Amino acid sequence: MTVIWAELIPIDRLTNSPQTLRVTSHNDRRVTAAGGQIWRPAVTRRPGLTLDLFDGAFSGQISSGAGEMEVSLSALGDLPPLAWGRRACRIWAGNPGDDPTVLDPWFVGLVDTATLRDGRLTLRLMVDDAWMDRPVLPEDYAGTGGAEGGEDLKGAAKPYPLALRAAWNQWQWILLVPSFSMMLMA
């Protein structure tokens, strides 16, 4: 039997501080006390994750992974008002007796939204893609001449070097300019 453990970190609206909730899919002592933590048996619908590679319109857009899971509020006890938007979530899958904190996470992402219905909280999960909002190549050419390029390169991203020069009798790739690569033999 596969067990699900989930660590959810919403914000307590009264104190404006993070509150860690640990939930699991089974009510078994080997599961609810795993890793020296208390995991409440509150998962009523296991998480399902999807990745859309084709939208049907040939637009070339690929969406990041998303999913849902459902948690019983009555199993969580008394909780303060919680804010769920874009809050951290980690999910592990394993067997009874496993320590989820040493397992590789099955999902690391965010709870996008939470919807309450009939005493159950449906959590919409999403991949945390905020790192993609930063430039991959953080440095730009200054355009002051020499190694900083001419005025025409000002503001263009600097490429990363592709090879180490200390490779004896090996092929090595050296990136000369962003649009031209050259292979040398040592």
Image (tube, helix red, strand yellow):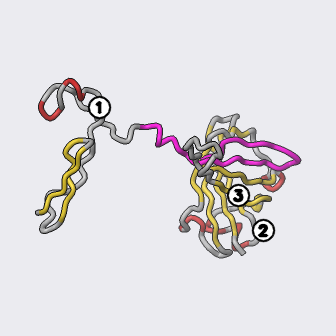
Quarter of the picture containing the C terminus is bottom left
Q: Is residue 112 magenta?
A: yes
Residue under pointer 3:
47
Q: Amino acid at mark 2?
A: Asn
Q: Amino acid at mark 3?
A: Pro
From the image, state whether disc 1 or disc 3 is nearer to you. Answer: 1
Residue drawn at point x = 70 percent, y = 61 percent:
39
Q: Earlier in the sequence, mark 2 or mark 3?
A: 2
Residue range in magenta is 110-134
Q: Height in image: 60 above or below 157? A: below
Residue drawn at point x = 76 percent, y = 68 percent:
26
- Where is residue 181 drawn, in percent x and y? 22, 49
Q: Height in image: 41 above or below 126? A: below
From the image, state whether disc 1 or disc 2 is nearer to you. Answer: 1
Q: Height in image: 104 above or below 83? A: below
Q: Earlier in the sequence, mark 1 or mark 2?
A: 2
Q: Which mark is residue 156?
A: 1
Q: Amino acid at mark 1?
A: Ala
Residue under pointer 2:
27
Discs 1, 2 touching: Cβ within 8 Å: no
